Image (cartoon, rainbow, N blue to C red):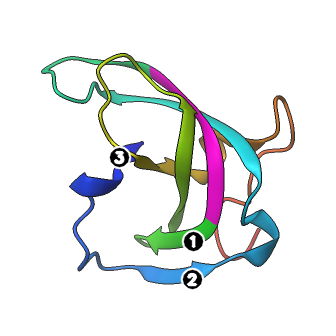
Amino acid sequence: MVPDDDIPRDIDGVRGVEPEYAGRFAECDGGGPIHGGKYSGRQEFKGTLTGDFVDIGDPPSRWYLMVDLQDRPEGFEGEAVWCLSGNTFLGEDGPRLRGCPDD
């Protein structure tokens, strides 16, 4: 997960929108650097998906934009977060989101 304000706008990747995810409640979690610190750990977010995504790399990894955060790690100040598809679930315990354009 990467705070939205930390994502460069000139990322090499393919951007798009999946309208069926727009406005849907989701949860995402994952490991990585803890925002504002020097350590890594598990972080969990709950919020609303916009439907926006970016595919990065080859093979591509798909990242979805989550806003209106209802749950976020302590000290996380961002208003949005990019979530890796494989760590993002619709609803409380719903299905995992598609992981790449071919899924």
x, y percent for residue 83: 51, 48
Cα–Cα span, label 3 and label 2: 18 Å
Q: Quadrant of residue 9?
A: bottom left
- Disc 1 secondary structure class: strand
Residue that badge 2 annotates: 16
Q: Residues within 10 Å of mark 1 (few under 14, many from 20)?
A: some
User: Is residue 10 found left or right of 67 in the rendered image?
Assistant: left
User: Is residue 20 found left or right of 33 in the rendered image?
Assistant: right
Query: Can I make out residue 59 in this image?
Result: no
**Magenta span covers which residues?**
43-50
Say which quadrant the C terminus sits in.
bottom right
Residue at x-position 15% and y-position 21%: 37
Residue that badge 1 annotates: 52
Whether residue 44 appears in magenta in the rendering, the answer is yes
Residue at x-position 30% and y-position 79%: 12
Residue at x-position 17% and y-position 27%: 36
